[in-house]
Amino acid sequence: MKSGRDHVKAVLFDLGGTLVKIDNSEVPHVMKRMLEDCGVNRSLEDVSKAWVKSEEGLNFRDMTRLLDEFWVQRNLRILHNLRVDSETEKLARFMATHWWDYSRVTLYPDAKTMLPQLKGKGLKTGLITNGLQSDTSGVLPQVGLQDFFDVVVVVDTLRRMKPDAEVFNYALEKLRTAPSEAVFVGDEMETDYKGAQKCGLPVFLVDRGGKVQDKSVNRLSSLEDLFERAL
């Protein structure tokens, strides 16, 4: 009889916080540099406050309806908070279009080590992210993963977001893989872990900081632990 490991044909991942480091503290710095290049000079403190204030009443699920326009509207809020009143529409679109020209991301060390090993095992790979196509097009080349995944599911794909079951099922269909033949790895309990569970996917929560105390959660302190736990 084959073990559960023998049945695993595909590994699906979340992106930000799972494979790629996300540091929100850098956002105001990036925004300040962009604004300065466009002739708008504001203090880092003012930019930080404007960014935080722009989140009041913001619903990120609106991204499914607005797509890239979501970031334009978000930037307009920030510019309004900064009292920028000249060419705001043009500036907001520049910020949305060129964000990844200014912002840099890196792979987590454990992701850099384990991802090539998946291909070595002949496993299919997929990415399911609540980011837009424009975001993944900016991020994946920075970390050398632009041609790595067999399927990439973004908000634009179905105009859906995790934890909606459709996004997980779509990835499995594209890979021609049953839920029992795949595993999903993410870092968010509600969107990643519970969303994948509802689809019958075996799921692991990456918890590098050891913050999760719930013993019932399939937790990974490192992505490399996946080889011992599931592969």
Image: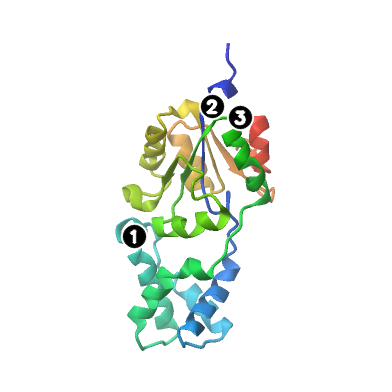
Q: Position of residue 98 (x, y in %)?
A: 44, 70
Q: Tell me what residue is drawn at x 54 percent, y 68 percent.
A: 103
Q: Position of residue 35 (x, y in %)?
A: 48, 81
First along the sequence among labels 3 and 1: 1
Q: How many marks?
A: 3
Depicted 30 relative to depicted 124: above or below? below
Q: Is residue 6 visible?
A: yes
First along the sequence among labels 2 and 3: 2
First along the sequence among labels 2 and 1: 2
Q: Which mark is residue 41?
A: none
7 or 144, which lies in front? 144
Q: Amino acid at mark 1?
A: Leu
Mark 1 burial class by Cα count in 10 Å: few <14, some 14-19, many 20+: some
Spot the residue most to the left: 65
1 or 62, which lies in front? 1
Mark 2 burial class by Cα count in 10 Å: few <14, some 14-19, many 20+: many
121 or 157, which lies in front? 121
Q: Which residue is mark 1?
A: 67
Q: State the image quarter where residue 165 is shown.
A: top left
Q: Which mark is residue 8?
A: 2
Whole-number angstrom distance, CA of label 3 to CA of label 1: 35 Å
Q: Amino acid at mark 2?
A: Val
Spot the residue most to the top: 1
Local secondary structure at mark 3: loop
Q: Position of residue 71 (x, y in %)?
A: 39, 67
Q: Amino acid at mark 3?
A: Ala
Q: Which residue is mark 3?
A: 230
